[in-house]
Image: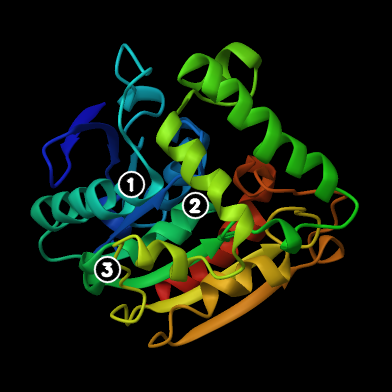
Amino acid sequence: MIQIPTIDNYSLSGKVYLNNKSASKNKVLIVNSATAVDKKLYHHYATYMTQNGYHVITYDYRGIAGSRPKRLRGFKASFTDWGQKDFSGVIDFAKQEFPDHKIVTLGHSIGGTIIGMTQKNIEISGIINIAAQTAYYKDWAKNKKAKIYFLWHIFFPTITKIFGYFPGKTLGMLEDVPKGVIDQWHNRRLHANMKQPMEAAGIKFFYKSCKARLLTLGLEDDPIGTESAIKRIHDLFEESDKKLEIIKLKEIAVDKIGHFGFFSRKFKDSLWAKTLVWYDQI
């Protein structure tokens, strides 16, 4: 493990996977995690990409997993911090360590959303977003909407208010999450347009300055990253050469993939190979 400095000098836990030199593509892939997810989720995918010529950087956002302080109660962090400060720092690190390489990015869920929150996204040549959305509840799958709403907008905020952070590990629900992230996500329920209320609060966005090629992927059975949900983020990248695609279960001959299943090793020769072919064209 290494430490990667953010632009405000917070130290993030990261890991660099060096490529197979004989197959080098002169590209470095930055993996932006989903909310409350340890970077370890992406280990096997990162290893696969190194075997196919890519350097890969995975990292934990401030307040999450390896980048969690000893005391999370009272710790200040938001998902806009993850984009503005953390992802910006990782881009700087990638440029420093691999100066002659193109930077490509994989954004999983919130990891795709935060790409538009840093002006440094102009350094990126290609982006694959998987289930990247704004957490607007009316976009969720109808048969799961009530359950997800209860978790995200009643249970999570209530527990967070009691503990001062969301104790995900204790509850067996992924990683602990800073209060500011939960609060910011909870406030998303009121607005179909993510940008308007946040811009009114002084937050800047940089989707329009991003000219990277973009492939937005959704999974047919993902109740959170539905087509209408991922289209909201996809459409914000106005200057990108872009494509949106929903992966059907029958195409992969499986019964389920869901919001996190994409990174299972059983998809090495199907979904992972699909991303490799696309990145190779950048």
Question: Taking 231 as reference, is 274 above or below it?
Answer: above
Q: Is residue 42 visible?
A: no
- Where is residue 55? Give x, y as percent: 29, 51
Label 1's element?
helix
Residue 239 shows which numbered tag? none
Q: How many marks?
A: 3
> Image point 12% across, 42% down: which residue?
8
Q: How far apart are the two marked residues, 1 and 2, measured between alpha carbons?
A: 9 Å
Q: How far apart are the two marked residues, 3 and 1, measured between alpha carbons?
A: 13 Å
Residue 110 shows which numbered tag? 2
* Picture quarter with the N terminus: top left
Of residues 242 and 133, the one nearer the viewer is 133
Q: Relative to 228, is 99 on the left or the right?
A: left
Q: Relative to 10, is 186 on the left or the right?
A: right
Q: Quadrant for residue 174, please give it.
A: top right
**The residue under label 3 is which amino acid type?**
Asn
Question: Taking 36 as reference, is 200 above or below it?
Answer: below
Q: Is residue 4 visible?
A: yes
Q: Quadrant for residue 139, please give it.
A: bottom right
**The residue under label 1 is which amino acid type?**
Trp
From the image, tell me which residue sits under label 1: 82
Of residues 170 and 138, the one nearer the viewer is 138
2 or 3: tag closer to the N-terminus: 2
3 or 1: tag closer to the N-terminus: 1
> Image point 41% across, 36% down: which residue?
180
